[in-house]
Image (cartoon, rainbow, N blue to C red):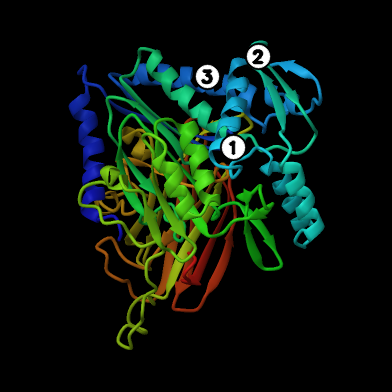
């Protein structure tokens, strides 16, 4: 199921006309900000405020709070408190309230999950990472040793003194709950600023919504995870958190086989029976812990655990594309939205279609990586990705990313005419997305060979356009001609100051993408 052009065009009209309707009024409205390289991934911040000035003021406060918490909880920062603590062993260390809380929560979820969620999963992750570098899988003895290490309590906590003692030197994985706690705190901090009435913080697909606002949340289909693919589900969420874990973006390739980065610490082996687990819970930290746990447990075990907890619902997608939902999941599904079968069905090409229209067995994937700024984090540029025919007539807009509608004319090539501005197919301006964490700045966008009216185009040559403009940055445009006639092809495109790399992959569809 694809997003309808009428809905997307309506969203664009709402964005443009809404700015006019809100002008010079005291009506609260959404302001959206996107940043890259936040905790190693992407940040979406939506603030409901009366004015742009209030929203930007609250944005600055939230970013400062995220930076403060990253300095405590981020293992990506070598100077952070948690990174320094991880280097200690067998000595009680006085730690911050934030770090102590995260360690307490790891102990709690380890107990509740029967060991399926455990910081000692880091031992197995390190083992598989090193084995992959040697192009082999771990040996039976190595796996047994990792299981033995995972069975040892990684720390001792003293609540009275608020100290934490590392009991060994084994690798630990603390990113999941650390990120969840940062999302929760940042969202609460936005509201405490007094500048906004509601806030959404989404870091790498794990999100929290607080205040007087109902957010549309798309759950990424793990078998079709391009930015503009139809979601596996669409939810309506208020004052709750949503988190997704999955094996489709991170893992290890060994001897032409893919192994998930999610491991069962009880066996030290990657799990693959559940390829995506999405959880709705009261806070992001809980949703993070449960989405990882439900990726490890069997569906029956996940049901029992979820049933024992308040305010927890979930969607699991198994390796064969089957969707399993908790009893109350339907309460969050958007009315009128039919849950799509993960990955969909592969198309069948008839004799009449061959040679006269786009081969439906093929798709185009546009991969692009935004250039990193020299700063720790940076605003995402405005980006448009579209296709033109040989007469330079726009055929389909695949992606349109912007924060402020009034700056859309800065996308000069995309904006050049009314025809283009009505073609925002694949851009969901009304909601956010929950997904497995992506690397900062890396995106994949799909074209299914249909025009803006949903009709297959004719085979032949088309031009793929990637336009990017950054506030206080540069303007860049990539144009690449490519033939789409049913013969697979791959093109690497030259990067620029805004798009460091890009490629076009015209390929046959499979059940895994």
Q: Find residue 110 and name its label.
A: 1
Compute the Cα span from label 1 to label 2: 20 Å
Give the image location of residue 365, x and y in percent.
48, 62
Q: Find residue 65 and name its label.
A: 3
Q: Note whether 259 is above or below 305 in the view shown.
A: below
Give the image location of residue 7, x and y in percent.
22, 50
Q: Residues within 10 Å of mark 3 (few under 14, many from 20)?
A: some
Q: Residues within 10 Å of mark 2 (few under 14, many from 20)?
A: some
Q: Nearer the viewer, residue 228 or 127?
A: 127
Q: Residue at x 21, y 25 (%)?
A: 22
Can residue 489 be seen at all in this image of the molecule? yes
Residue with the mark numbered 2: 162
Q: Residue at x 71, y 41 (%)?
A: 151
Callout 3: helix, strand or loop?
helix
First of labels 1, 2 by sequence position: 1
Q: With 208 as the anchor, is 144 left or right in this view?
A: right
């Amino acid at each position: 199921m694809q997003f309808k052009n009428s809905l997307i065009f309506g969203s664009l009209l709402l964005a443009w006309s809404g700015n006019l309707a809100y002008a010079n009024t005291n009506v609260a409205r959404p302001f959206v900000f996107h940043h890259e390289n936040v905790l190693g991934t992407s940040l979406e911040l939506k603030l409901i405020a009366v004015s742009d000035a209030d929203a930007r003021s609250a944005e600055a406060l939230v970013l400062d709070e995220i930076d403060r918490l990253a300095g405590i909880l981020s293992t990506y920062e070598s100077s952070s408190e948690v990174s320094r603590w991880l280097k200690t062993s067998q000595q009680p260390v006085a730690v911050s309230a934030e770090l102590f809380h995260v360690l307490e929560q790891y102990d709690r979820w380890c107990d509740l999950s029967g060991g399926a969620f455990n910081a000692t999963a880091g031992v197995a992750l390190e083992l598989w990472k090193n084995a992959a570098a040697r192009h082999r899988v771990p040996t039976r003895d190595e796996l047994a040793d990792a299981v033995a290490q995972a069975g040892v309590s990684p720390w001792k906590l003293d609540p009275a003194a608020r100290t934490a003692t590392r009991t060994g030197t084994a690798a630990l994985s603390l990113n999941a709950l650390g990120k969840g706690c940062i999302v929760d705190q940042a969202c609460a901090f936005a509201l405490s600023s007094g500048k906004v009435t509601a806030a959404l913080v989404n870091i790498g697909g794990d999100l929290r919504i607080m205040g007087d606002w109902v957010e549309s949340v798309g759950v990424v289909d793990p078998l079709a995870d391009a930015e503009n693919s139809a979601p596996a589900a669409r939810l309506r969420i208020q004052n709750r958190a949503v988190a997704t874990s999955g094996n489709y973006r991170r893992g290890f390739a060994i001897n032409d086989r893919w192994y998930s980065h999610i491991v069962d610490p009880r066996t030290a082996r990657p799990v693959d029976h559940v390829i995506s687990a999405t959880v709705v819970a009261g806070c992001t930290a809980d949703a993070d812990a449960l989405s990882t746990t439900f990726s490890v447990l069997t569906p029956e075990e996940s049901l029992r655990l979820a049933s024992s907890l308040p305010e927890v619902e979930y969607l699991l997608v198994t390796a064969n594309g089957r969707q399993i939902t908790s009893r109350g999941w339907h309460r969050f599904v958007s009315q009128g939205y039919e849950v799509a079968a993960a990955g969909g069905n592969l198309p069948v090409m008839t004799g009449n279609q061959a040679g006269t229209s786009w081969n439906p067995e093929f798709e185009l994937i546009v991969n692009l990586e935004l250039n990193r700024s020299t700063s720790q984090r940076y605003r995402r540029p405005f980006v448009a990705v579209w296709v033109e025919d040989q007469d330079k007539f726009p055929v389909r807009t695949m992606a349109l990313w912007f924060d402020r509608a009034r700056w859309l004319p800065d996308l000069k090539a995309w904006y050049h005419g009314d025809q283009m501005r009505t073609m925002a197919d694949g851009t969901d301006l009304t909601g956010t997305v929950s997904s497995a964490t992506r690397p900062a700045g890396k995106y994949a966008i799909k074209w299914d060979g249909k025009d803006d009216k949903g009709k297959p185009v004719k085979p032949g040559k088309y031009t793929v356009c990637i336009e990017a403009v950054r506030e206080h940055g540069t303007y860049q445009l990539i144009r690449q001609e490519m033939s789409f006639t049913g013969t697979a092809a791959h093109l690497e495109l030259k990067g620029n100051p805004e798009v460091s790399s890009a490629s076009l992959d015209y390929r046959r569809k499979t059940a895994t993408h």
